[in-house]
Image (cartoon, coloured by chain):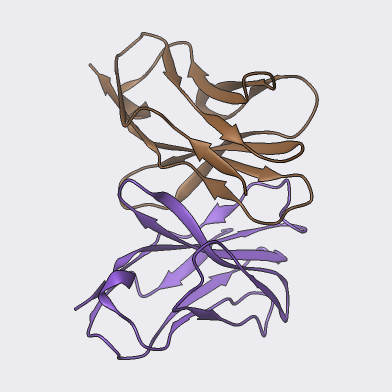
Chain colours: A brown, B purple
Amino acid sequence: AQSVAQPEDQVNVAEGNPLTVKCTYSVSGNPYLFWYVQYPNRGLQFLLKYITGDNLVKGSYGFEAEFNKSQTSFHLKKPSALVSDSALYFCAVRPYGNNRLAFGKGNQVVVIP
Amino acid sequence: EAQVTQNPRYLITVTGKKLTVTCSQNMNHEYMSWYRQDPGLGLRQIYYSMNVEVTDKGDVPEGYKVSRKEKRNFPLILESPSPNQTSLYFCASSTGTGTNQPQHFGDGTRLSIL
């Protein structure tokens, strides 16, 4: 069965500094990987996905993520964090040919002004 | 506006009293899914549906039922709710089979079972 690990409960970063949210996964076969963001009292919003091709994918709001097959990782990054980036971030994986989606437990990001 | 609508947004009820959470999407999506979100556990998939009259279990289906009689609707049914089903529930939809497409989420339903 597929699984996702987001090792840090909370990530604190100063405004303007680079932001990294870590994600590693375990899956049989090729993975489809996703990042979502959740603001208070709202549903999840899609940020970006990796399906195939270039290992560096760019998404909404200046976020990007790098797929590393050898390390089974898909870390989310943003070069310069904004206070408005403070939210809960979820990594998710779906194996190719499998219709079930597995989410990590989420990372709370706090951007300090 | 493209959206996934869940009702109710909040519900407090008692053990054993049947309840239904409705979910409707206006994007003509084939794939729909239910998740529950619990602190420290992230989102866990309850049931999903690939299309009308096609449903399948996710990771935590026990105690839940679903139906997909129309493409736009995917209600979640708790026949005999118990306190361990107190949680935040999300409905989501995506185009095609949903395999590699991002999901659109509703704003959630917070259920409290006393």
Is residue B22 left or right of A1 when viewed as pictured? left
Q: Is residue B113 above or below residue A47?
A: below
Number of marks: 0
Q: Is residue A62 above or below residue B9?
A: above
Nearer to the camera, A80 or B66? B66
Q: Quadrant of residue B72?
A: bottom right
Residue at x 62% of width, y 65% of height: B32
Q: x, y percentage for residue B98?
A: 71, 55
Residue at x 70% of width, y 56% of height: A99
Q: Quadrant of the C terminus of chain A?
A: top left
Is residue B105 left or right of B95 when viewed as pictured? left
Q: Quadrant of residue B2?
A: bottom right
Is residue B19 left or right of A49 when viewed as pictured? left
Nearer to the camera, B106 or B60? B60
Q: x, y percentage for residue A87?
A: 34, 35
Q: x, y percentage for residue A64?
A: 58, 21
Residue at x 47% of width, y 41% of height: A104
Q: Is residue B10 above or below residue A42?
A: below
The residue most toward the left is B114
- Residue A72 visible, this angle: yes
The residue most toward the bottom is B17
- Residue A63 visible, this angle: no
Residue at x 48% of width, y 68% of height: B5
Nearer to the camera, A83 or A75? A75
Is residue A74 left or right of B77 when viewed as pictured? right
